Amino acid sequence: MAEDLKGRALRSLVTADGKLRISLEDIEVGAPAPGEIVVRVEASPINPSDLGTLVGPADASTFRNEDGALVADIPAERLAGVKARIGQKLPVGNEGAGTVIDAGPDVQHLIGRTVAILGGGMYATYRKLPAADTWLLPEGAAAAEGASLFINPRTALGFVETLRAEGHKAMVHTAAASNLGQMLVRICQADGIPLVCIVRSPGQVALLRDIGATYVVDSNAADFRDRLIEALAATGATIAFDAVGGGDLASRIIEAMEAVAVGNATGYNRYGSGVHKQAYIYGTLDPGPTIIHRVGYSWSVDGWLLSDFLKRAGAETAARLRQRIVDERNTTFHSGYTATIGLSDALKPEIAAAYERKGTGTKYLVNPNL
């Protein structure tokens, strides 16, 4: 069936003269080999991790259409950071879901079923890939239910697994009103883990309180430090997962944790408390440098990547997390979307500017077959 199947896919190109070009390209899908399937992609989210490849370091204020492509300028000081990808038309879209329309001889039973995929190149009408790289969804499940099951759910669960493995009892999460942040609120409620949510506006405070979050603090409020210290004292949180990355937010969290620890100490120590405080940076909402104001000596700041976590966790843990995610796909791990767009919509400057902003409550879903 798929030998002559043709489709279209988004590709992202960085040129040597400092331009980003996002274009629609024709693709051909060959017949599936044993163990392979061909999926008609029906839902794929635009996550911050996707934007790193799709938009990269481009200046979103310069989005425009040229010769059928979406084009933007890349500031000269940012071009060196993407030197390795200059001249390459890269596939985009990390995860998604769709219907199996063809399959190798040993996986024919999957034809007609809906599968979730983490395979890259998902902003395409069709994807051929190993059946083993997909998650089979229950009969009757819609593609949108499986579109966002890999990255945000496993990241949120990975935070909880990391907390437990390192012996912490409560955590802090920044940019906590995000899709991932709302999942984490529901996970921590179910698992009995105290969670301190840091957001950036009163509206986001209200949003999280409405879904049951107990400790929510606004980093832009004048009393942020006092409210953060109160929340840390109440929960005992000593680990933080920071989606912002740039600036000194991680440092301010560590300083507040140290203030709580020193306040609980029975004596003075010129080196600060002996309570270890851990901050993990897992996002780059602020692409600027991370600034740390040292306070005491019992603290660490590291990066946290989902892929590294899964390697450490092992197959048994990964399987356990997978089953929970599939079982709770419409509850704990439900994702809401602002709008569903087609591939050609992704090339419109006004839509691109909206999904590039990564704003809370503005998550876009791509249906390449619209």
Image (cartoon, rainbow, N blue to C red):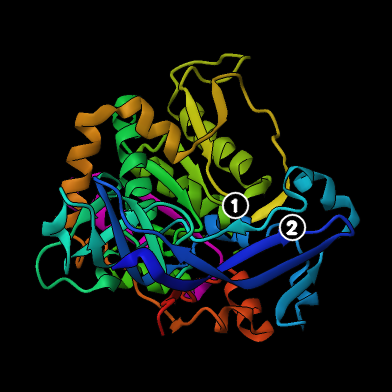
Rendered image quadrant of residue 207: bottom left
Instruction: Decide if residue 359 is in sight here.
Output: yes
Question: Residue tagged by mark 2?
Answer: 57
Where does residue 2 sit, x and y in percent of width and height? Answer: 33, 66
Magenta includes 243?
no
The residue segment tinted magenta is 182-203
Q: Is residue 131 above or below residue 145?
A: above
Q: Is residue 272 above or below residue 209?
A: above
Magenta includes 194?
yes
Secondary structure under badge 2? loop
Marks 2 and 1 sit apart, C-alpha to C-alpha, by 16 Å
Secondary structure under badge 1? loop
Q: Quadrant of the N terminus?
A: bottom left
Q: Please state which amino acid type lies under the numbered disc 2.
A: Pro
Where does residue 262 sit, x and y in percent of width and height? Answer: 51, 27
Question: Marks 2 and 1: which is nearer the front?
Answer: 2
Give whichever of 269, 300 is nearer the camera: 300
Instruction: Decide if residue 192 is in sight here.
Output: no
Q: Please state which amino acid type lies under the numbered disc 1.
A: Val
Give whichever of 29, 313 is nearer the camera: 29
Question: Residue tagged by mark 1?
Answer: 244
Q: Residue at x 38, y 41 (%)?
A: 171
Q: Residue at x 78, y 67 (%)?
A: 59
Closer to the N terminus: mark 2 or mark 1? 2
